[in-house]
Amino acid sequence: MYKVFSGEKCVMVSDSEVQLDEKNVKQIYFKSAEELHREYKQFSRSRVLKTLIIVGDEDRVWKVFRSLFSYIKAAGGLVRNDKDELLMIYRNKHWDLPKGKMEKGETPDETAIREVEEECGIKKLKIKKQLDSSYHIFFKDNKECMKRSYWFDMTCNDSSIPVPQAEEGIKEAKWMSREDVEKIANKVYPSLQEILKTYL
């Protein structure tokens, strides 16, 4: 199953029907690219609906849905230090995990390490394993874009204090305990909640 977030809204692409204990959900069956586009536009404008579930051949539907957007790839890290604290950044009134756009010729893991180093001013990063990707939709220059963020579970042996990259709009970069992360979880983007659960 694929999940794509747009603000507080979520689009799910699934091979089979999904039962949710929520209201404000619409479930449709994939018939054509045109109808999918129309349904998505109605959903994105709706003030009532929060979740759109598209049922069909998962890979085919995903390919069609993805084609509606400019596609951007990014990568970042769920970074822990030797005290098992998590590295968090504060930007655009949200707590976030350090990540950034992939540059030409880079692999996702290379991007993730470079971006964590740049955004937080730390070194000695080591990737343990790759985590699930997250997807979210946003507007840039009046274009609707979809961003795939590759995530990596990382360790950090750098004892220096993180330094936020001001030119990227980052106000704060800090190590947080599990208790601290739980307290600010409601100020983390919906698309990151499942990645954070890996730590919590």
Image: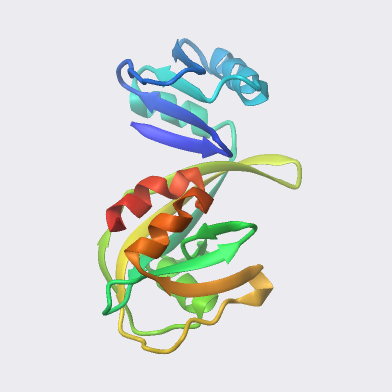
Q: Is residue 4 above or below residue 52?
A: below
- Give the answer, above or below, for where 51 lies relative to 126: above
Q: Is residue 188 above or below residue 103?
A: above
Q: Quadrant of the C terminus?
A: bottom left
Colour option used: rainbow
Which of 170/111 is in front?
170
- In the rendering, at what x and y percent does residue 137 appear? 57, 40
Q: Quadrant of residue 70?
A: top right
Residue reaching furthest left? 128
Q: Residue furthest right?
A: 142
Q: How many marks?
A: 0
Give coordinates of residue 68: x percent, y percent.
58, 31
Q: Residue furthest bottom?
A: 160
> Which residue is pictured at 42% across the width and 24% down the height?
61
Image quadrant in which the N terminus is located:
top left
- Residue at image position (52%, 67%) is 89
At 28% from the left and 54% from the top, the residue drawn is 198
Instruction: State the image coordinates of residue 2 (x, y, percent, origin top left).
Output: 38, 34
User: 65 or 78: nearer the eye?
Assistant: 78
Quadrant of the image occupied by residue 50: top right
Asked if residue 79 lies left or right of residue 25, the reply is left
In the rendered image, residue 172, in percent from the top left (x then y), is placed at: 57, 72
